[in-house]
Amino acid sequence: MNMKPGQTITHFLIEEQRQIKGATGEFSELVSDVVTACKVISNLVNKGELIGVLGSAGSENVQGETQKKLDILTNEVFIEANEWSGNLAAMASEEMDDIYMIPKQYPRGKYLLTFDPLDGSSNTDVNVSVGTIFSILRCDGEEGTCDKEGAFLQPGTKQVAAGYALYGPSTMLVLTTGHGVNGFTLDMNIGEFILTHPNMQIPEDTREFAVNMSNMRHWEKPVQRYVEECLAGKTGSRGEDFNMRWIASMVAEVHRILTRGGIFMYPIDQKMKDNGTEGKLRLLYEANPMSMIVEQAGGASSTGYERIMDLKPKSLHQRVPVILGSKNEVERLVSYHAE
Ligand code: AHG
Ligand code: MN
Ligand code: MN
């Protein structure tokens, strides 16, 4: 592909579109609108308390989590940027109980968009990196079936594209359309995402893990064993020292892994089982898009028992255990689950 560092994301998308026979441009338009939404969100989180958007909104989402003002605002930004284009059949988000139908005055398209408009939103009030995650599916069903919840319940392997925006020291957008992973940095002066990280690759080996250690006593045995071995370091069975990170923003965590390797875990634990949930992270707009990006960059992603992208979703807000990152470490932990 004609991919040059320094090109704008629009240029990149058009070059990509030219590689696909019969492409109508609808997909590129859709991604462009998502990119616009991410730029608007970047501006909102950047202004922060200057425009009074920090703090709680005093409401809860469908999963009983307290919504931040920014959770609600960023969800609205995504809807506004995407509902009018005629490229979408429907949308689904962490912040909406049901799917979002395209209003009557706009035409409908063949794509479905799912998103977590603000990932890591507990970090907004403390000025730590947050992000946006999105996934694009196609609806090939008959007319009248695409704006139903069932249309969204496709395995991750069916994703047409996935990406995230990271609002950190710089704003970045990382995208895959199924041909590798490319990273763009927002040049605030010209308002464009510029290709700065072509063909991102996750190193196969790592000595860095990310997990919320406060849950250790509740984890299943294979995860406890894996982390205990990391903690034992040089003197333990791994014979090497490991480093640990936990940002509590999955986007920032995955971005670090894409940059220098590592393994990220949000495993199932006894507390979740007691509450009748199957994990912390949501399959359709967190686990699947991140799994596609990680696999496209040469990494692996699993629940511990199954490849995440092979799961057949049961509901819109289904949660799953997530173990992803450097291939050899993920495979090791999966093998512990198999024993
Ligand atoms: P969200 O803000 O969209 O609800 O997601 C937060 C997620 C994820 O980004 C992060 O890895 C994890 O929750 C943090 O969980 P803990 O607070 O349990 O560490
Ligand atoms: Mn999230
Ligand atoms: Mn969120």
Image (cartoon, rainbow, N blue to C red):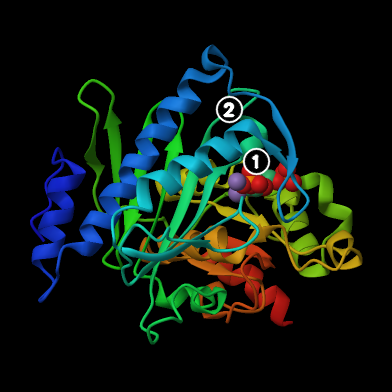
User: Quarter holding the N terminus?
Assistant: bottom left
Q: Measuring from the top left, give residue 191's x and y in whole percent.
A: 24, 28
Q: Residues within 10 Å of mark 1 (few under 14, many from 20)?
A: some
- Compare residues 26 and 159 and report the one nearer the observer: 26
Q: Measuring from the top left, give residue 176's x and y in whole percent.
A: 32, 59
Q: Measuring from the top left, give residue 30's x and y in whole percent.
A: 28, 56
Residue in the picture at 65% in, 23% down: 126
Q: Describe the element under mark 2 as helix, strand or loop.
A: loop
Residue 259 visible in the current orientation = yes
- The residue beneath circle 2 is 128
- Compare residues 216 and 180 and report the one nearer the observer: 180
Q: Describe the element under mark 1 as helix, strand or loop.
A: loop
Residue in the picture at 68% in, 25% down: 55
- The residue beneath circle 1 is 248
> Residue flagged by tag 2: what amino acid is it?
Val
Residue in the picture at 48% in, 45% down: 132
- Compare residues 13 and 169 and report the one nearer the observer: 13
Determine the image quadrant of residue 253.
Answer: top right
Label 1 or label 2, whichever comes before in sequence order = 2
